[in-house]
Amino acid sequence: MADETLKCTQPVRGPIAASETSAAPDASPREQQKEISMQARVGKPAPDFEANAFVGGSFKKVTLSDYAGQWILLCFYPGDFTFV
Amino acid sequence: MQVLAVSTDSHFSHKIWQEQELKKMVPGGVPFAMLSDAGGRIGRVYGVYDEDAGVDIRGRFIIDPDGVIQAMEVMTPSVGRNIKELIRQVKAFQHVRATGEVTPAGWQPGQPTLKPGPALVGKVWEVWKPDLIPN
């Protein structure tokens, strides 16, 4: 959570499947990744996820559900230092 | 409203971009969280991950306080977004959530809304015309 735990690699869960607890516990993240497909639909719950983030000057892990109860703008972009 | 910006860059890259460039465009830097989607796993779930380029393309999602996606827009990378239209949509969704009314095309706060019901069928022309859409 805090900067003291900073490492070169910082594994995070990425998408958190609604059925995560019932999924095969021995499936590696790579195996689970094969099944990832678009789930986002208007009028449906936004798929939850966990990501490493730079927030307010420090690094921490963030999940979408941290922001429950608020309006959220989730905004994807191609990359830092790109032009548009 | 909370803004979460996501790209496949690392959180380390986000820090340097904020400090080296964004702070020169926006005083104090951008005020929102910058998330790393390394590997594009989140982007795949949201339908914005470009497998060929290995990046998340421009896509934005308006999510309400119940965690439900109310709007999405996905664009190829070369065209930037229109923040005014985004804000208009957010205001409209917030109005709808607060009042149960619905907002016609191009609606801006303060303009008439529609109250769906049998009496409105065939009568929308009386309360809404295209010239109500602001330029």
Image (tube, rainbow, N blue to C red):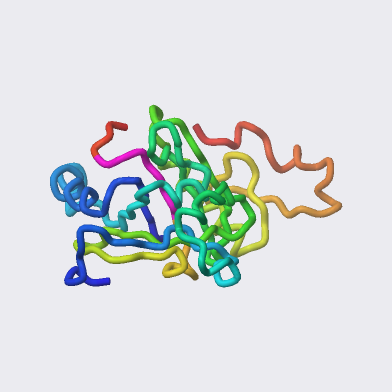
Q: Is residue A55 above or below residue A39?
A: below
Q: Is residue B110 among the parts visible in the rendering?
A: no
Q: Nearer the viewer, residue B13 or A21?
A: A21
Q: Nearer the viewer, residue A7 or B88?
A: A7
Residue displayed at 30% across by 59% down:
A53
Task: Check residue B106 for magenta coloring.
Answer: no
Which residue sits furthest front?
A: A26
Q: Nearer the viewer, residue A65 or B105?
A: A65
- Is B117 on the left-hand or right-hand side of A76? right
Q: Is residue A29 among the parts visible in the rendering?
A: yes
Quadrant in the picture for the N terminus of chain B: bottom left
- Is B69 on the left-hand or right-hand side of B115? left
Residue displayed at 38% across by 55% down:
B4
Residue displayed at 49% across by 52% down:
A33
In percent of width and height, residue A57 lies at 19, 62
- Is A2 on the left-hand or right-hand side of A67? left
In percent of width and height, residue B126 lies at 75, 40
Give the mark count: 0
Q: Nearer the viewer, residue A56 or A23?
A: A23
Residue displayed at 52% across by 57% down:
B63
In percent of width and height, residue A35 lies at 56, 51
In percent of width and height, residue A5 lies at 21, 70
Which residue sits furthest right?
A: B118
| Residue bounds of the magenta highlight | A73-80
Q: Quadrant of residue A83?
A: top left
Q: Quadrant of residue B50?
A: top left
